[in-house]
Image (cartoon, grey):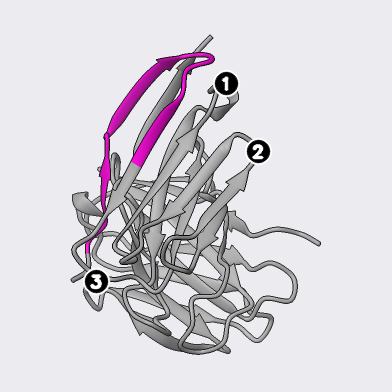
Amino acid sequence: TQLLEQSPQFLSIQEGENLTVYCNSSSVFSSLQWYRQEPGEGPVLLVTVVTGGEVKKLKRLTFQFGDARKDSSLHITAAQPGDTGLYLCAGPPGAGSYQLTFGKGTKLSVIP
Amino acid sequence: ETGVTQSPTHLIKTRGQQVTLRCSSQSGHNTVSWYQQALGQGPQFIFQYYREEENGRGNFPPRFSGLQFPNYSSELNVNALELDDSALYLCASSRGLAGGVGTQYFGPGTRLTVL
């Protein structure tokens, strides 16, 4: 079973600070996705990274896929209260797989 | 274009009962996946339906079953409910082909509590 380990599990920061959350595995993933989930709602896809070493930017969010495609990171610059939520990484456990394996998530709180 | 909808929003059942959860997929999507998200955990894959047939299953017992209808909406049925079945049940639809994840769009979930 391919597992995705996310760290930290919880993160509480002040508005304006920068942060990085991590998603690691001992297995290679053909792609990884990052989602944000707010209380009472389903996960919302933020980005998909496919190529080893790939960097994608979405406004203040920067996503990186490791060269070996075993890890990924999400960096948020100048965090805002609207960034509060559960950040989940997920990936198909094999090329052409029909399911997503999720990490446990990082619960981020941005304090005004 | 309407998004993924799920019903009911919340549900309370007792041990041993049966439950049916419903999902309407996003317009144009032919694949529905179901996930279970326990408190403090990430979602876990239950199964996927593609064009009305089960297209893969996670590590869940046979008392978890499903259906997909010709309009691609779907049901998740759970028999003989156990306390550990208490969770948020998420439905995700995609315009996927068999054997591929596709970009999945999640509904808001059904919160099931088993007493």
Disc on res. A80:
1
Res. A105 visible in picture: no
- What type is the residue that disc 2 sits on? Lys
- What type is the residue that disc 1 sits on? Gln
Please tell me whether mark 3 or mark 2 is closer to you in this view: 2
Please tell me whether mark 2 or mark 1 is closer to you in this view: 2
Judged left or right of residue B87, residue B102 is right
* Mark 2, residue position: A59
* Marks 2 & 1, CB-CB < 8 Å contact: no
**Residue name at image x 60 percent, y 46 percent:** A57
Quadrant position of the C terminus of chain A in the picture: top right
Q: Quadrant of residue B26?
A: bottom right
Q: Secondary structure at mark 3?
A: loop
* Mark 3, residue position: B60
- Between the C-alphas of marks 3 and 2, the distance is 39 Å
* B95 magenta-colored: no
Q: Secondary structure at mark 1?
A: loop
Alpha-carbon neighbours of circle 3 within 10 Å: few (<14), some, or many (≥20)? few
Please tell me whether mark 3 or mark 1 is closer to you in this view: 1
Judged left or right of residue A98, residue B24 is right
* A18 magenta-colored: yes
Judged left or right of residue A91, residue B53 is right
- Between the C-alphas of marks 3 and 1, the distance is 39 Å
In x, y percent, where is residue A60?
A: 60, 34
- What type is the residue that disc 3 sits on? Phe
On screen, residue B7 above or below A107: below
Same chain under badges 2 and 1? The reply is yes
Q: Chain of mark 3?
A: B
* Residues in magenta, as a range: A3-21
In x, y percent, where is residue A52?
A: 41, 66
